[in-house]
């Protein structure tokens, strides 16, 4: 059974205050955020010359304002147009009772996700990859390639575009089928590479609840010690698709992994507004869903990424605010835009992942080559690189990462809305031996060498 | 108040997204004998251009864009009955049925596209999220639309974009509507594969695409889709 508190939240999706989607999006979210920015004097705090925030007091002010925003707004249920509000007691209790560490996976192969602080010496956990689509032929190969990368802590892996040769259509039983196949094969792959207890994240081949119901907690599929993905479709909104996943995960005694993207330029407005929205969303995930790992993702709707200056700054402030003021297991994604076999992909990863790592994020996930837009544009090598960045950034300060970001940003910024799509898995790898082409290996080594020269503490090339 | 002042206030009301004031100043200007076409060009379109440019330059955000579009509609409600049908059609750049297909609950991309299209002079019929293919076509027929725009963020909803085109073909309606695509997993290659008429990488690309489709020289279906935006694989 689900927790009584969650049943109460479900009830509120039918009994809360009525509000139209438009009123919520265009009036309530923007006006509440504007009021908070004004009340806490947070306007114009985005500093493009310093993309990684280093001021604790600024992060703390954003936390206070974001906490109040969570209480004032709550979340709108898209299915019923009812607002799910939480009391201060409920929010404080949910934050207090949230775990500060969990073992994802089992035994020696498992990974502890632990709460971190900015500049924490404990490395950030990293899970790879984002749900780039792959054919049934290549999906097991690329997934195995990622699982073999020992730096990668948790296996998410790409998504299947077909199952038994048939397209996976949303809302149809093909989703249930692909969920089962994805979950069981992901588990088999972890066993095959000698990491049977490795933690995983699922299910990315199906976005609706069908895939998750078919893959999580079923025999041979994702275990309750794996992370069950339950992402909100938009900031400060919830729906029954997500709540089905929430209930199913809690029924299984599993670990819930929430997420909710705040959009710079969208309903919350400027980067400062997106930070407030992101903090409120993250906190509300604990109160409404009783999540174990909560997302504080941010994207810029004009650049469709977060490795630009606005996105980096907003991510850094959000995660410093959450990690300084709570013991929550926070999650973030650095969303790259360039594709495999490009220098810029690795530079974007270096800047984005080190920014969230040094800001106190507990768990980072990615990479997302080519913005996740192009099928089969993903290789294990950038997953290794991303995990290496996540682990080694813990040895630097925010000031040092800010300095590295300022050096590197001008290299990829000019093409951020016109990125190089790079090469596909087949073009970048020998898919039989799972080794990168000489070209891709050389780029990887050159970027690492350059990063070391800039002061980034990679242990080896 | 002289007419020029009222026109200026109408423009400000639209930029500020004030529906009530936009309707009020529009009616007052017409009562004072304002030329409806002048009102549209000098007050409404220029105000929408201002907000659209501010959005593109990071000086305005999505709520402002949506509210400005709503205010412009409030003003047009008074103006349209005063002009000939032919002129009204010329003012409206076209009608776009916009939605997110079945299985996809993401709305942010759709909302941005809708707001930008409205700011660029299109009549946008937003049919929401999680929309079955037939609903797009029913809405297009009912609203006498020019363009069906299908935005999705998830791969498992992509096949519904193709299904919309198939249903249009099966019902003999493919030559009535342009079908355009956008969203995370959508690519120019997919657009060509399913014989859609256009692809926009961003919301601004989608608006450029719609303007080109409605230039008066094109008929659906296009032999080759128009592609706007990057990552052209």
Image: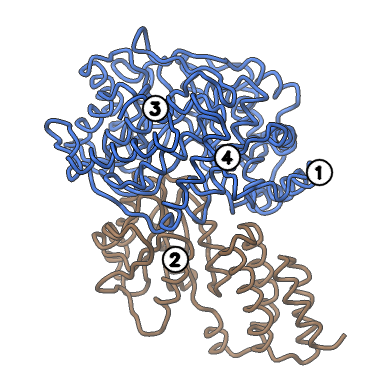
Chain colours: A blue, B brown
The earlier-in-sequence mark between 4 and 1 is 1
Image depth: mark 3 or mark 4 in front: 4
Most foreground residue, A410 or B202: A410
Image spot of residue A178 (x, y percent): 28, 33
Q: CA distance from mark 3 to mark 1?
A: 38 Å
Q: Which residue is mark 3?
A: A127
- Mark 4 falls on what kind of element? loop
The earlier-in-sequence mark between 3 and 1 is 1
Image spot of residue B194 (x, y percent): 26, 60
Q: Which residue is mark 2?
A: B206
Q: Which residue is mark 1?
A: A39
Image spot of residue B232 (x, y percent): 30, 60
CB atoms of marks 3 and 4 within 8 Å? no
Q: CA distance from mark 2 to mark 1?
A: 37 Å
Determine if residue A202 is in view.
no
Image spot of residue B66 (x, y percent): 62, 62
């Amino acid at each position: 059974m689900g927790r009584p508190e969650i049943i109460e939240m479900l009830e509120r999706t039918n009994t809360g205050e009525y509000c139209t989607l438009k009123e919520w999006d265009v009036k309530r979210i923007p006006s509440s955020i504007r009021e908070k920015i004004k009340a806490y004097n947070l306007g114009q705090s985005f500093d493009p010359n310093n993309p990684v925030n280093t001021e604790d007091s600024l992060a703390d002010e954003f936390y206070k304002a974001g906490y109040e925003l969570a209480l004032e707004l709550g979340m709108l249920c898209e299915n019923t147009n009812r607002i799910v509000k939480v009391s201060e007691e409920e929010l404080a209790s949910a934050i207090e009772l949230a775990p500060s560490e969990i073992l994802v996976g089992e035994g020696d192969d498992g990974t502890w996700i632990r709460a971190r602080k900015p500049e924490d010496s404990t490395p950030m956990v990293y899970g790879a990859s984002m749900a780039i689509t792959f054919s049934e032929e290549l999906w097991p190969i690329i997934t195995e390639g990622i699982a073999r990368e020992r730096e990668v802590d948790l296996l998410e892996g790409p998504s299947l575009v077909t199952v038994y040769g048939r397209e996976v259509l949303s809302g149809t039983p093909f989703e249930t089928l692909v969920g089962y196949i994805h979950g069981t094969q992901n588990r088999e792959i972890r066993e095959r590479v000698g990491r049977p207890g490795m933690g995983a994240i699922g299910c990315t081949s199906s976005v609706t609840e069908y895939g998750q119901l078919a893959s999580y907690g079923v025999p041979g599929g994702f275990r309750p010690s794996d992370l069950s993905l339950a992402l909100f479709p938009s900031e400060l909104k919830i729906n029954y698709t997500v709540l089905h996943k929430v209930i199913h995960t809690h029924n299984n005694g599993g670990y819930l992994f929430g997420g909710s993207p705040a959009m710079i330029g969208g309903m919350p407005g400027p980067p400062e507004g997106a930070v407030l929205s992101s903090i409120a969303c993250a906190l509300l995930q604990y109160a409404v869903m009783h999540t174990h790992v909560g997302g504080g993702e941010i994207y810029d709707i004009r650049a469709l990424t977060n490795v630009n200056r606005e996105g980096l700054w907003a991510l850094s402030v959000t995660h410093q605010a959450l990690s300084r003021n709570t013991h929550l297991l926070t999650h973030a994604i650095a969303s790259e835009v360039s594709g495999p076999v490009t220098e810029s992909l690795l530079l974007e990863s270096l800047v984005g992942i080190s920014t969230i790592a040094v800001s106190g994020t507990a768990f980072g996930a990615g990479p997302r080559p080519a913005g996740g837009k192009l099928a089969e544009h993903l290789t294990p090598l950038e997953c290794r690189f991303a995990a290496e960045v996540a682990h080694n950034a813990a040895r630097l300060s925010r000031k040092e990462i800010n300095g590295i970001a300022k050096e590197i940003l001008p290299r990829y910024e000019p093409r951020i809305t016109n990125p190089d799509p790079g090469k596909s898995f087949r073009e970048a790898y020998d898919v039989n031996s799972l080794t990168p082409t000489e070209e891709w290996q050389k780029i990887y080594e050159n970027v690492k060498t350059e990063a070391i020269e800039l002061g980034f503490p990679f242990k080896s090339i | 108040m002289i007419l020029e002042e009222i026109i200026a206030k109408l423009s400000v009301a639209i930029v500020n997204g004030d529906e009530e004031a936009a309707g009020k100043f529009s009616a007052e200007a017409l009562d004072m004998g304002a030329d409806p076409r002048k009102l549209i060009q000098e007050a409404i379109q220029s105000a929408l251009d201002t907000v659209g440019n501010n959005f593109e330059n990071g000086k305005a955000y999505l709520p402002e864009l949506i509210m400005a579009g709503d205010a412009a509609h409030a003003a047009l409600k008074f103006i349209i009955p005063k002009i000939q049908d032919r002129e009204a059609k010329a003012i409206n750049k076209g009608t776009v049925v916009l939605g997110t297909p079945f299985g996809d609950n993401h709305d942010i991309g759709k909302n941005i596209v809708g707001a930008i299209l409205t700011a660029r002079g299109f009549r946008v019929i937003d049919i929401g999220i999680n929309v079955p293919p037939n609903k797009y076509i029913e809405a297009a027929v009912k609203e006498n639309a020019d363009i069906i725009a299908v935005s999705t963020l998830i791969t498992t909803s992509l096949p519904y974009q193709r299904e919309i085109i198939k249903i249009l073909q099966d019902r003999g309606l493919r030559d009535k509507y342009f079908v355009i695509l956008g969203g995370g997993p959508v690519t120019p290659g997919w657009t060509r594969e399913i014989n859609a008429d256009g692809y926009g990488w961003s919301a601004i690309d989608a608006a450029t695409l719609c303007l080109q489709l409605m230039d008066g020289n094109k008929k659906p279906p296009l032999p080759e889709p128009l592609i706007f935006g990057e990552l052209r694989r």
